[in-house]
Amino acid sequence: MMSSMSWIQALAEVEKAGQAWVIATVIGTQGSAPRESSSKMIITANHSFDTIGGGQLEYAVCQKARDMLNGKHTGASHVLENFPLAAKTNQCCGGAVSMLLEYFPEPATKITIFGMGHVASTLVNVLGNMQAKISLIDSRENLAQDQTIKGLPSNVTPFLYKSMLDHIDHMSHNEITLVMTHDHALDYQLVEALLDRKDCRFIGLIGSKTKALRFKKRLVSASFSPAEIESVHCPVGLPDVAGKKPFEIAISIAAQIIQITQQNKTETKKRSGLTWKEINNTLSDVKEISETKENSEV
């Protein structure tokens, strides 16, 4: 689906929404071409934003971008390709367009929040600034409608279920999970179900130290191991950030989430992407192909 949004507006939106995307840039033209050098567009799995001239060229570029998004292009993060318009796209312009396609994966951080109460509503507005994909879960239709009316950050998606437990089967591996519903009995059921998955990156539970002790006793009775029980963080949030108001609790939890996401950051690689030599070789190959085709047409 095409959108009239400019590529620079779309860039901010798709990044905040936690989507994977490709930016396609015209890096050179020869002869008659639909758009000038430096024209750009953004392509996601289901949408494209702005234009590099439309027609078969744009269609071919979008197809190649979606191959990158679907992992069909050998996992490349950058692709340089020349498009002779007559030979490759059946366009009558007669020129050629050189394209650079750059792939940006969706954020590795995925967060599920169970409950749309005061703290959760405040928390998602803070976490809305993170490069993370956030799911906000509840079973209360009035709260879900309220969140939609208020508007949520673009990286937050609300889900309404008859039972919040139904969402657990739809979660991804290695998610950060936060349990903060209106019902202690439901909180316990959610914690049990999350532990049963055995693949959560983090399980946070809102509540007091008394609630934490009660839940631990029940989890012992349910035959969970000491390590599994200790993996449930209650009260969730950094203890140094004190306070009982919703915004204070939300800031404390947000700080802990940021801390978690920063702990596992790997050391910066000495090399990433393409080297200048590789770019130069690719451009030389493109030039050679273009010249060969020109000579054959003469």
Image: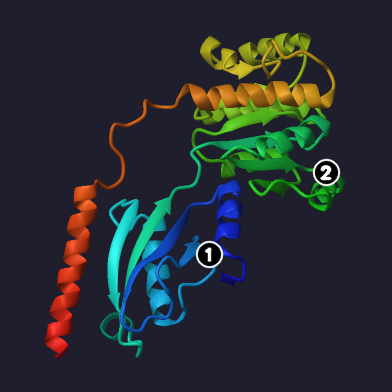
Residue drawn at x 12%, y 84% is 295
| Mark carried by residue 46 | 1
Helix, strand or loop status at disc 2: loop
Quadrant of the frame with the N terminus? bottom right
Answer with left or right where residue 248 lies relative to residue 105: right
Count neighbours of disc 1 (C-alpha within 10 A) and say few if under 14, some if 14 to 19, many if 20 or more: few
Q: Position of residue 184 (x, y in %)?
A: 79, 24
Q: Nearer the viewer, residue 189 or 48?
A: 48
Q: Position of residue 44 (x, y in %)?
A: 50, 60
- Label 2 amino acid? Arg
Q: Which residue is mark 2?
A: 140
Q: Is residue 77 visible?
A: yes
Of mark 2 and mark 1, the one earlier in the sequence is 1
Count neighbours of disc 2 (C-alpha within 10 A) and say few if under 14, some if 14 to 19, many if 20 or more: some
Q: Nearer the viewer, mark 2 or mark 1?
A: 1
Above or below: residue 92 compared with residue 288:
below
Answer with left or right where residue 35 lies relative to residue 257: left
Q: Position of residue 236 (x, y in %)?
A: 68, 19
User: How far apart are the alpha carbons under marks 2 and 1?
Assistant: 30 Å
Helix, strand or loop status at disc 1: loop
Residue drawn at x 42%, y 65% is 38
Q: Position of residue 166 (x, y in %)?
A: 66, 42
Q: Is residue 223 visible?
A: no
Answer with left or right where residue 82 lies relative to residue 60: left
Quadrant of the frame with the C terminus? bottom left
Residue drawn at x 67%, y 27% is 254
